[in-house]
Image (tube, grey):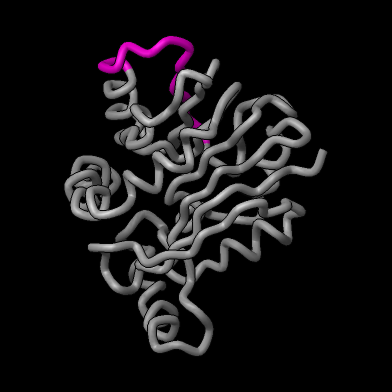
């Protein structure tokens, strides 16, 4: 299943990328600079959107099939100061306070333990550094969409790389002690209705 997810992921997401995701990614990443870590970098949808202000870019991807495509993508761009590593978001191979920004793009839904993931992100960020997030999230409690998300999630995560439709990522970020300095909530166009609710923005690690 991992092999199939890797090689069909970009095709599956193409209409949504064109409809909104690429624009959203660009708006978030144009303000990113310095030392940057992207967790769950997938096949590299963000690579071409990083600005010249990024002095070091580390792309982390745990899935070996995704990582192979990511490495090829990064090599084709002939970018300097870019490295690709393995490892999960719950165990980041980096020293404390290593990065100015950590980027998470459609990742928090599928990590095994979101609390540990956010704790690791906070650990590797420099004081005052920021998490840049773009995530699909749980619909509002009590809505029919949320009920469908709750119903479908057990089967969905089995076939979709542990993706949870009903994760309350915004609250998890706040609980971990981040200050959300910017957030936008919008429907992910051209996506299935159960994955449309999204949040995107910046969450700052206290100095």
Tell me the residue at 58%/36% (across/down).
Answer: 102
Residue 161: horizontal and vertical position, in percent?
A: 36, 54
Which quadrant holds residue 144? Answer: bottom left
Report the front residue among 201 and 12: 201
90 lies above or below 83? below
Report the front residue among 55 and 151: 55
Residue 76: horizontal and vertical position, in percent?
A: 25, 16
Q: Quadrant where the C terminus lies?
A: top right
Residue lying farthest to the right in this orientation: 207
Which quadrant holds residue 72? Answer: top left
Tell me the residue at 39%/39% (across/down).
Answer: 26
Residue 81 falls inside the magenta stretch: yes
> Does residue 135 appear left or right of residue 123 in this picture?
left
> Does residue 76 appear left or right of residue 103 in this picture?
left
Count of numbered labels shown in the rendering: 0
Residue 32: horizontal and vertical position, in percent?
A: 54, 31
Residue 121: horizontal and vertical position, in percent?
A: 65, 41
Tell me the residue at 60%/47% (across/down).
Answer: 202
Tell me the residue at 40%/43% (across/down).
Answer: 25
> Does residue 91 appear left or right of residue 135 in this picture?
right
Image: magenta residue range: 75-87
> Does residue 131 appear left or right of residue 70 in this picture?
right
Residue 148 falls inside the magenta stretch: no
17 lies above or below 147? above
């Amino acid at each position: 299943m991992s092999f199939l997810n890797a090689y069909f992921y970009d095709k599956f997401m193409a209409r949504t990328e064109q409809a909104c995701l690429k624009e959203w990614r660009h708006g978030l990443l144009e303000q990113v600079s310095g030392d940057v870590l992207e967790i769950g970098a997938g096949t590299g949808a963000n690579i071409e959107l990083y600005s010249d202000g990024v002095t070091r870019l580390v792309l982390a991807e745990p899935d070996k099939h995704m990582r192979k495509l990511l490495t090829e993508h990064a090599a084709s761009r002939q970018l300097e100061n870019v490295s690709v590593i393995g490892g999960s978001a719950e165990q980041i191979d980096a020293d404390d306070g290593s990065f100015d920004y950590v980027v998470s793009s459609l990742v928090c839904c599928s990590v095994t333990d979101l609390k540990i993931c956010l704790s690791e992100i906070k650990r590797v960020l420099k004081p005052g550094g920021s998490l840049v997030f773009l995530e699909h999230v749980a619909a509002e409690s009590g809505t029919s969409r949320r009920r469908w998300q709750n119903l479908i999630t057990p089967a969905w995560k089995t076939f979709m790389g542990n993706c949870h439709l009903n994760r309350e990522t915004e609250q998890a970020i706040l609980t971990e002690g981040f200050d959300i300095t910017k957030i936008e909530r919008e429907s992910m166009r051209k996506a299935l209705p159960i994955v449309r609710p999204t949040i995107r923005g910046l969450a700052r690690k206290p100095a």
